[in-house]
Amino acid sequence: MNQHRIAAIAAACGLLTAACALGAPAYAAGPEVVSGPSADPQCFAPWTDKTKFFKYPAKKGPYRIALANGYIANTWRIQMIQTAKAYAAQPDVAPKLKEFKVVSTGEDVAAQIAAINNFIDSGFDAIVVNAQNPAAFKPVIKRANDAGVVLVAFDNILDTEDAINVDVDQKGLGVYWAKWLDSHLPNGGKILEVRGVSGTSVDRDRHDGIHETLEKTGKKWDVVEVYGKWDDPTAQKVTADAIAVQKHFDGFTAQGGDTGVVQAMLDAKHPMVPFGGETENGFRKFCAKLSSQGLLCSSGGTGPAQVAVAIKTAIAALEGQVVPQSVKLPLATAEDPNFKDGDNYYAAQSDNFFVGNSFPTCNINFTAQEIMGQTEANK
């Protein structure tokens, strides 16, 4: 190495040393991996006994936290954003937040990644994200870790162990629905599967759970797939089109938009048959009302309040508490003949409301009024 190059490197090192001495920001390469348990084992339950535990450097609050949502055009996402705002306004949460920002970018993965990058560049302390694609975020995860930003994915999570994931067992939910159909259709049959938003981890995992479970039964199944985008009007239309073409189905399963699916069955005068579906209030109303006509339902899922668990996890991480890399949330389920008004559905409430929207183990409980008093608009 020549003397000029040695001198240049020495000068650069000197500049770096001077910058550090002047208080230039020093960035970490992500959280420290530590031993469990978590700071709140009941709320922050690890996914498995092999789940890693993270500890981020503690930061002084109040914090700037952003919600980077993707797709929004269905009631679950709208209620999720309303729930996030309601949680941020809770008396024990609001003092910890200097700013809570919400943005929804639609189905464009690049736009969602750009929004996250913008939040990182703007100095936000934590970002919670309902990811539009599970595998496309690796560069932005690294950027967040390098900048000391806590990144928490929920619902549609990320295929990574370098950020925090908060979710229910989405594949297990597909297994749950398929087992219900199997138990009520002893000879197999033709099933209409109303899927969610293409390309998301939730749609993929629920779909895999359904198909793997049905295949293991050894029965003959003919599964017709349509995409309802977890949205009642969209699901109603694609179901109506499928019935018009196929004429008859022996069972139905839908990831969301289930109220619209049943309405399409009624409009087409399709016989009521076994149905494995989500937790919309309108769907459960139908399940209770039409059980005697053959609509035998299992209703399972997780309320949009998992966004509140994600925010709670982000705050705990910012405070330097130990949290699992992957947090597992419980499912909320109800099955025929146990649908009860005022308990697991609400006849007087809107159809477009997801029941089971609480996580008592995290002290997260919301009334319908608290949630519906918020808007879904960007903030």
Image: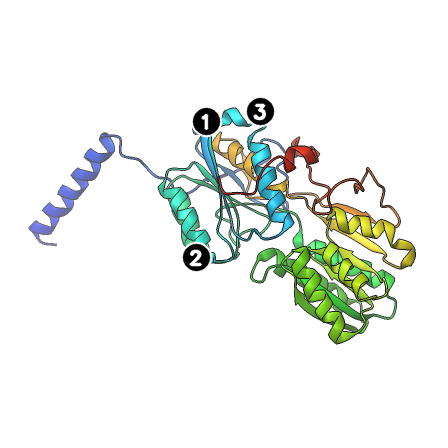
Q: Position of residue 374 (x, y in %)?
A: 59, 36
Gap between marks 1 and 3 measured at Cα: 12 Å
Is label 1 in a helix, a strand or a loop?
loop
On the question of residue 373 being in view, the answer is yes
Instruction: Kindly identify the amino acid type of the residue bearing the numbered disc 1.
Output: Pro
Q: Residue at x 58, y 57 (%)?
A: 201
Gap between marks 1 and 2 measured at Cα: 30 Å
How crowded pointer 1 is (Cα within 10 Å; few <14, some 14-19, many 20+) is rated as some
* Left or right: where 305 falls relative to 108: right
Instruction: Kindly identify the amino acid type of the residue bearing the numbered disc 3.
Output: Asp
Which label number is shown at residue 110?
A: 2
On the question of residue 29 being in view, the answer is no
Q: Residue at x 57, y 42 (%)?
A: 81
Q: Which residue is mark 1?
A: 62
Across the whole image, how many numbered discs are drawn on residues? 3
Q: Residue at x 47, y 57 (%)?
A: 109
Which label number is shown at residue 92?
A: 3
Q: Position of residue 44 (x, y in %)?
A: 61, 37
Q: Position of residue 180 (x, y in %)?
A: 81, 58
Gap between marks 2 and 3 measured at Cα: 35 Å
Along the polypeptide, which appears first: circle 1 or circle 3?
A: 1
Along the polypeptide, which appears first: circle 1 or circle 2?
A: 1
Instruction: Kindly identify the amino acid type of the residue bearing the numbered disc 2.
Output: Ala
Q: Residue at x 12, y 54 (%)?
A: 1
